[in-house]
Amino acid sequence: MEKQTKNKGFYMVLSVLVAIGLWVYVVGVQNPDSSGPVRNLPVTFVGTDVLESRGLMIVSGADQTVTLNVNGKRDALLALSSETVSITVDVSSISEPGQYSSEYQVSFHLPPSVSASSLVTTERYPQAVTYTVVRQATRSIPVRGTATGSVAEGYQAGEFRFEPELLEVRGEESKVNQIDYALVSLDQENMSETYSGDLPYTFVTFTGDTIAPTELETNTSLVRTTLPIFQLKEVELSVNLIPGGGADRENVKCRIEPETIVVSGAPADLEPLREISLGDIDLSKVLGSDTLTFPISLASELTNVSGVAEATVILSIEGLTTATLEVDNIELIHCPEGYHGEPVTQNRQVQIRGTAEAVAAVTASQLRIVADLQNAVAAAGTQTIPVKVYLDGRNDVGVVGDYNIVVSITRR
């Protein structure tokens, strides 16, 4: 009985092995016919370069897939996939926009060890590929920016900078021609330093609507965006008063309008800035009172946020008196070689300034008028020459104003 049980088990194992062997023989050696579906085969359009040369493009239908039912040898069927089956539609004959439905070409690209001769396509779904052809356009679209966050107190945002500044956009003509600009949005809170990074964008139409960049072809999906952030600082305006004409800083009442302006710049540039000098004022040129206008000039690293381009300086001399003396002590120096000069002007009224007591003590003999002919035109005739007036023996009184005399120059 035990022997019969062992024999029965042996024959069962043998039967399974024989069945497996027969299956391997039939499938591997005999390679029987079979059939089955091949799904999700992408459609490829050929001749699109010809289409584009005519100013046309495909806008819908390019992402379609096809399912085939195929008969053939089993090994060939097992090799079928989206990698070995191509579905193509030739669009090179299309010359006008519109909706089209075209039959497609099926091609098999099997490994050399597998024959495609047995393969027959018995069913197709869909039977044809439907797609839309439209006119295409290409435009350069400017980039703009908007900051939706906030800047820290005491700081100011500058102007956006973009790289690239223009986007090359290609696509359906009706969409491309609607675009006004590409908008980059920066959302940062409490900004106190310059922002720089790559940001996405959206297209804004002339009517204010938006178009997603994915609906069109562009040369970049991100824009390098820089938003400078500058520190603000209120800075006083000043002038450099040069003593002269008997007056110094203590004798002058000076008012500047405006007194201060607000400038922006990098913290390292603003930190050492204490005041902005408008320039020099020679007090010997100021008679009693004067109003002068100066441009407000800043270093290239700074920006005048206040927007005031000029400052007015109002001056008045206080506590001093003036007097006018007739001076005939005139001297010519540095006459050009080969020429001789003689003063036509024999005397000149000169104004002096100082305290009443000091002015009263000055006599005309203490004043000298000196004309330097070194820069005179080397030509015979009379010329007007600027002069310098010297006051000898006093340092508490000064000469006020500019003077000149007429000189006659002759050849030797």
Image (cartoon, rainbow, N blue to C red):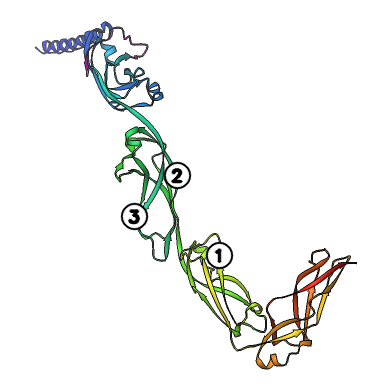
Q: Amino acid at mark 1?
A: Ser
Specify whether residue 336 is in view.
yes
The residue beneath circle 2 is 165
Q: Count the marks: how many?
A: 3
The amino acid on which the numbered mark 3 sits, given as a three-letter code, is Thr
State whether residue 235 is above or below residue 350: above
Residue toward you, 96 or 335: 335
**Which residue is at a point 65% across and 90% down the rendered structure image?**
355
* Quadrant the C terminus occupies: bottom right
Residue 291: give x, y in percent of width and height: 56, 76
Task: State the image quarter where residue 346 is shown.
Answer: bottom right
Residue 368 covered by magenta stretch: no
Residue that carries the numbered disc 3 in the rendered image:
148
Secondary structure found at label 2: loop
Q: Residue furthest top?
A: 30
With 167 as the anchor, is 397 left or right in this view?
Answer: right
> Which class describes the residues within 10 Å of circle 2: few (<14), some (14-19), or many (20+)?
some
Mark 3 is surrounded, within 10 Å at the Cα level, by few (under 14), some (14 to 19) or many (20 or more) other residues, namely few
Tell me where residue 303 appears, x and y as whole percent: 50, 62
Of mark 2 and mark 1, the one earlier in the sequence is 2
Stretch in magenta: 108-125
* Distance CA(mark 2)–CA(mark 1): 30 Å
Which residue type carries mark 2?
A: Glu
Q: Residue at x 62, y 81 (%)?
A: 287
- Mark 3 or 1: in front is 1
| Mark positioned earlier in the residue sequence (3 or 1) | 3
Specify whether 304 is left or right of 381.
left
- Residue position for label 1: 297
User: In which quadrant is the N terminus drawn?
Assistant: top left
